[in-house]
Image (cartoon, rainbow, N blue to C red):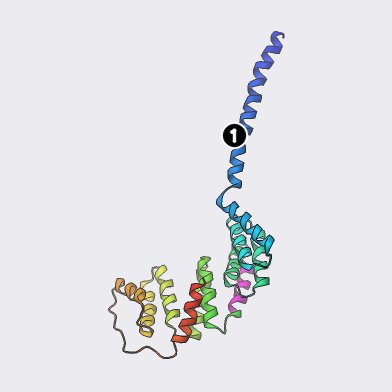
Amino acid sequence: MTVKEKICFLVIFPLLLGGCNSYTSTTPQADEVKNTPAEQKKARLLRTLDRKYENPDAHFELGQLYHADGMWAKAQWHYNIVLSFDPVHRPAQAAMVKVLLDSGDEATASTTADIYLNQVSGSATESLKLGLAFQKQLLDNYALKCYQQALHLAPNSAKINRQIGYYYLSKKDKVRATEYLSRSIQLDPIQPDVAGELGRLGVQIRIPQKTEKNTKKLDKIVEQSDKTN
């Protein structure tokens, strides 16, 4: 081997080693990405859908994962599938509005939200359920519209007044929170959580001798809907 060939060998060989080391060092990182909890959950959900494609909850969860990754089109596609199987799937409706907003399509998001609000305009229970779904997606303005709609339909619901009270409490609006929580406990005095919040707000609680009529039946339905969200 000539001197020139030796020099070329000494220059090129370390570069080749560096390239190999670079390649081998990135391979485990790629594997780690594939094995993240989110990717593992996606794989499980896809297997679930292979067994039963008409599973709205699995499509919804998968849509949420794609949504979190910023894959708007895939998330929207799965939300549409959910709503094709279950047209009153409130979490999917709220998530659809959210993904439209996140993708920058504010006009369609607003129109879609109005459609969903109109769908539940005759039911206090469904308005509350949609409001809870909107609040979970951090769409507070739409959530409040739903809560106000529910309250208009059932002003003597302790559960609805309580939810609005908690909404305002989360917004640090103590005046409005006190107003709605106080109304709630007047309608149904047996609410230790509400009593505790009012106590922390400095409200002296006076428990009435009897509750308002015609509130228990609705509140039982609302309570059941709370547990499903």
Q: Give 197 or 171, whichever is nearer the viewer.
A: 197
Q: Give 67 or 44, whichever is nearer the viewer.
A: 44
Quick check: is 84 in the magenta stretch? no
The residue lying at 44 percent from left, 79 percent from top is: 159
Count every numbered label the image shows and give the total: 1
x and y, in percent, of residue 106 in the image? 61, 66
Q: Give 199 or 39, whichever is nearer the viewer.
A: 39
List the single residue furthest toward the bottom: 213
The residue lying at 29 percent from left, 80 percent from top is: 205
Magenta span covers which residues?
A: 108-117
Residue 10 image-quadrant placement: top right
Q: Does residue 197 lie above or below 30 as drawn?
A: below
Crowd band around label 1 with a 10 angstrom C-alpha radius: few (<14), some (14–19), many (20+):
few
List the single residue furthest toward the top: 2
Q: Does residue 119 lie above or below 62 as drawn?
A: below
In the visual, does 226 lie left or right of 117? Answer: left
In the visual, does 6 lie left or right of 140? Answer: right
The residue lying at 66 percent from left, 63 percent from top is: 78
**Residue position for label 1:** 25
Q: Does residue 47 lie above or below 90 as drawn?
A: above
The residue lying at 62 percent from left, 33 percent from top is: 24
Q: Secondary structure at mark 1?
A: helix
- What secondary structure is the stretch in magenta mostly built from? helix
x and y, in percent, of residue 111 in the image? 63, 73
Q: From this viewpoint, is residue 70 visible?
A: no
x and y, in percent, of residue 201 in the image? 31, 72
Is the N terminus in the top left, top right, bottom left or bottom right quadrant?
Answer: top right
Q: From this viewpoint, is residue 59 visible?
A: yes
Residue type at mark 1 is: Ser
